[in-house]
């Protein structure tokens, strides 16, 4: 352990609070350290470049299940029904939460395998995180992402009458923030240009796909 004194303190307080997991979880998630962002500061970088004292969060990618569910939620297609049979991730109409997806021990689904789902044959306490070109190619070319982009574009069109309002809503849904002036300018210019005749998606759908495919969507800062 990198911080044994902290672990000892938590262990003692955990016992003092009657072994309450609720107390332990609340204490951790409400701590300043847990809520710290991954923003860099020059003075802190110079003093503690390895982040030994946890002055910032370490940027991390969403697990594939969380990422897929987030895509469905932002596009407005997530099915929140509970219980029932499992489903195949390759089915076009499979919009339920990923926890209900079939997981084959012998033939793991390509999406799960691509985004570092652990070996289903053994227990795993930690996932190996890889960054390979095929992951970004999936976000740019897969039918699943295209369907969510189309759904998101439709959601924006139904909610807002102007492209400016649609852009702002898209950023709020995808990133939880307002677009910068530069981002709004670039998005408006992109939407205003005619799509190529060979494009499968129109400009509004391509804008929605860009939101979903960006690092800001899949990474937690």
Image: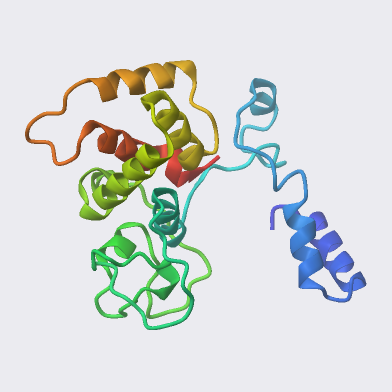
Q: Is residue 42 left or right of residue 161?
A: right
Name the spot of residue 128 as percent of width and height, x first.
Answer: 43, 59
Name the spot of residue 174 as percent of width and height, x first.
Answer: 46, 41
Q: Residue at x 35, y 64 (%)?
A: 95
Q: Residue at x 75, y 56 (%)?
A: 28
Quadrant in which the N terminus appears: bottom right
In the displayed structure, 114 sits above or below 104; it is: above
Q: Residue at x 38, y 65 (%)?
A: 117
Residue sticking out furthest to the bottom: 85
Residue sticking out furthest to the left: 198
In the foreground, 9 or 96: 96
Name the spot of residue 50 as percent of width and height, x first.
Answer: 61, 37
In the displayed structure, 149 sits above or below 182; it is: below
> Which image quarter: residue 153?
top left
Q: Is residue 104 left or right of residue 45?
A: left
Name the spot of residue 62 as percent of width and height, x first.
Answer: 47, 52
Quadrant in which the C terminus appears: top right
Q: Is residue 77 left or right of residue 173?
A: left
Q: Is residue 106 left or right of residue 186?
A: left
């Amino acid at each position: 352990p990198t911080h044994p004194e902290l672990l000892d303190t938590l262990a003692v307080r955990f016992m003092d609070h009657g072994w309450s997991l609720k107390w332990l979880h609340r204490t951790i998630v409400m701590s300043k350290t847990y809520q710290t962002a991954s923003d860099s500061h020059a003075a802190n970088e110079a003093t503690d470049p390895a982040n030994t004292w946890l002055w910032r969060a370490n940027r991390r990618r969403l697990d594939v299940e969380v990422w897929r569910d987030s895509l469905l939620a932002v596009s407005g297609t997530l099915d929140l029904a509970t219980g029932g049979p499992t489903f195949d991730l390759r089915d076009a109409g499979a919009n339920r939460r990923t926890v209900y997806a079939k997981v084959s021990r012998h033939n793991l689904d390509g999406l799960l395998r691509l985004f570092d789902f652990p070996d289903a044959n053994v227990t795993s306490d930690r996932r190996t995180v890889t960054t390979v070109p095929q992951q970004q190619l999936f976000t740019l070319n897969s039918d699943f992402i295209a369907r969510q982009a189309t759904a998101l574009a439709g959601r924006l069109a139904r909610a807002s009458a102007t492209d400016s309002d649609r852009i702002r809503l898209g950023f709020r849904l995808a990133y939880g923030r307002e677009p910068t002036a530069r981002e709004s300018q670039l998005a408006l210019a992109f939407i205003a240009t005619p799509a190529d005749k060979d494009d499968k998606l129109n400009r509004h759908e391509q804008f929605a796909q860009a939101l979903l495919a960006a690092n800001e969507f899949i990474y937690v800062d």
